[in-house]
Image (tube, helix red, strand yellow):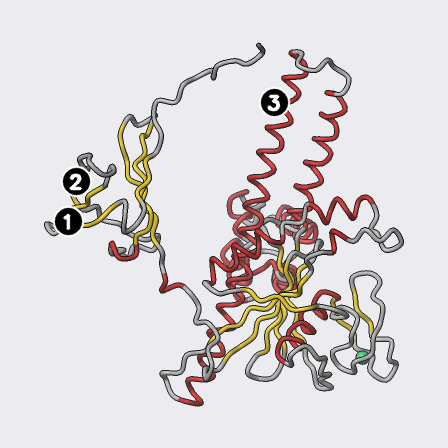
Amino acid sequence: MKARVPWREKKYRPLSFSAKFGWRITPEGRLALSLGRGRGRIVLPLPEVRSRDGRPVSPGDWGEIRLCWDRNGRSWSLHIAYSAPGDALPAPVEGRPTVTVAIDEGVINPMTLAAPLPDGSMKVLVLNGRQGRSVKRYRNKAVARLTSRMSRCKNGSRKHRRLQAAKKQVEAKTERRLHDFDHQVSAKAEKFTREVHETWTEHHQTVSGPETVVGVRLVAGDVRGIEQNTNKKRRASRSTRQQLSQWSRGRQEDFLQYKTGLKLEHISEAHSSQTCPKCNTRTKVRGRDYVCKNKNCGFWCHRDAVGGVNIHTLAVNDGTFVPDPDLRVEVTYRRSQAGWSPLQRSLHAYHQDVLGRAGTGACREERRSAQNRATPASSTAAGVAVDCAALSDDPTTRKGAGRASAHAA
Ligand SMILES: [Zn+2]
């Protein structure tokens, strides 16, 4: 008896036409959308599709087409999906020189990528997940607050309904932000992979001819299942369990696979964060830094960077650790999302203060030009340092010089 009819009936729904069956190109070069057997079809002039960088996309690369009604514009539109296979990185194939990019995934740093360079050193990129953690924390606190208020009012009351709507709004908003965050993480990982691929292609082409194609192998540590560790003794704490359950590793992996066009492999990452990549000694890690307990070795590195380097070793050597005494690791830190770090913010305040006191033509920068100083290039630790040096040397540095130094970094 409590069942109610929907508040509003749907008048329109998008019609989808799958490739090869739903739509086809007629011999006259027009687009035909099939409405099923025994019914007429919709025939339209062939639309012109351009990819995001302006290149025309031929109908051979089109996928599903949807015919949608734009309620605000009061018109029909075709939504055409297309694939851009030219963007995919070459897969590792037998007989093709291959570079392995290892990924260590974590809750604090969503992805740490490690790849060798032609000069023998390891290039490591640590992506910081601060922004994602803060969004999750905000959601957990807001949802907890609303849930506790809801528990105090009657089920289905007006107050209850309003609180429920507020909760849904918070969840929807944070979900959008986390979605964007995962895109930011995977975009930076993709950029790293493409840079490594480019370096190796250049190297191999100078060695063995300009037609050489370098394949890329993406390998990640297999962490599936740690959420399900129900062993009482080894069970994670309540807050750690919450962090693990909200870890959007799978979506980040999917985005990365989609963006690079590669298939991600998973290998066992047992002891990859404990083993010293230089001398093969095992050390239990506490905190964010790895310090080898072997006194003769004294290897020191960022914890996740060690994990990335070890996963790379495991992937290349079929699951065994091979220590490398001459290992050189070059670590870069990047925040996943644009924005200033506390250090950059305080440097900026200092810089503005100096400009304000300097007199003689110099004055505080406008907000817009100041924003430009935080270019993505200056988000690495080295970038900040160089930026800082340039600013403190010359107190009259104006926006142009500040920007130039950021790019130089
Ligand atoms: Zn060591």
Q: Residue furthest front?
A: 38
Q: Which residue is mark 1?
A: 26
The image shows residue 140 at horizontal and vertical percentages of 71, 36
Residue 353 in sight in this render: no
Q: Which mark is on residue 151?
A: none
Residue matched to label 2: 43
Please state if 206 lies on the left or on the right of 42 as rendered.
right
State the image quarter where residue 44 is shown: top left
Give the Cα distance between marks 2 and 3: 44 Å
Amino acid under disc 1:
Thr
Figure check: 39 above or below 318: above
Up/down of 390 relative to 343, above or below: below
Which secondary structure, mark 3? Answer: helix
- Residue at 27% x, 48% y is 21
Q: Earlier in the sequence, mark 2 or mark 3?
A: 2
> At 42% across and 87% down in the image, what residue appears?
206
Q: Quadrant of residue 122?
A: bottom right
Q: Quadrant of ligand 1?
A: bottom right
Q: Are marks 2 and 1 in contact (CB under 8 Å)?
A: yes
